[in-house]
Amino acid sequence: MNQLEELAIQVRILEKQVAFLLKINGLDLSALRNAPDTELLMWYRNAVTLLGTSKTIPPEMISPWAEIFLQLSEMELHRIADLVEYRHTWEPFYQVAVKCMTHVRQHADFSRDLHLQQLYAVLDKGKRNIRDAAVIILTEHPKGLPPRAKALLRSDDVLRHLAK
């Protein structure tokens, strides 16, 4: 066996170990990493469409979104940006996360329903995940950020980190 084969074996072993550690720690969030561009574009378009609706979103429709928010990283957002020719593709996902959180929190059974409370917690984690990806994107592409997006980030006090 040559050195290249040994190195390839070691890399495969390390990949399996990392995947296992991510899974047991609840950090296995890369399902979208290998998703086709069409799927990423579908989620982006659905997020934009969902922003335009004023109807209450039922919790069963929110659960898949919570998972998507956890899986999005700057890598997927960059891929979407290349498809739609707009750098700040995190914005509709962030707004949908806030909208979903509001709908869950305003649900009549929120104070009594553990599932709704857990869903809210997952949405909050997903929103923070999108915000973190937004900070990375804003560091790379500070120009062209609409005022509305600045206001969204200001609400989480993220812009102060960009000044550094």
Image (cartoon, rainbow, N blue to C red):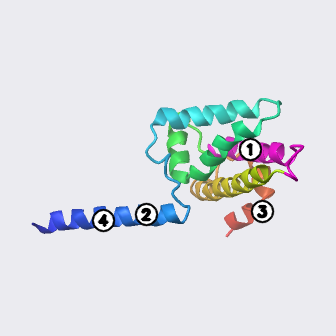
The residue that label 3 is drawn on is 157
Q: Secondary structure at mark 1?
A: helix
Ranked by sequence position, the earlier of labels 3 and 4 is: 4
Identify which amino acid the numbered label 1 is placed on. Gln
- Residue 33 is situated, as x and y percent measured from the top left of the image, at 47, 48
Q: Is residue 28 left or right of residue 122?
A: left
Give the number of the mark in front: 3 or 2. 2
- Residue at which label 4 appears: 13
Decide if residue 133 is on the left or right side of residue 24.
Answer: right
Query: Quick check: marks 3 and 4 in contact, CB under 8 Å?
Result: no
Q: Is residue 43 above or below residue 94?
A: above
* Disc 1 target residue: 95
Q: What is the three-letter code of the residue carrying label 2?
A: Phe
Region in magenta: 88-112
Q: CA distance from mark 2 to mark 4?
A: 11 Å
Q: Residues within 10 Å of mark 3 (few under 14, many from 20)?
A: few
Distance CA(mark 4)–CA(mark 1): 39 Å
Mark 2 and 4 residues: CB-CB less than 8 Å, in contact? no
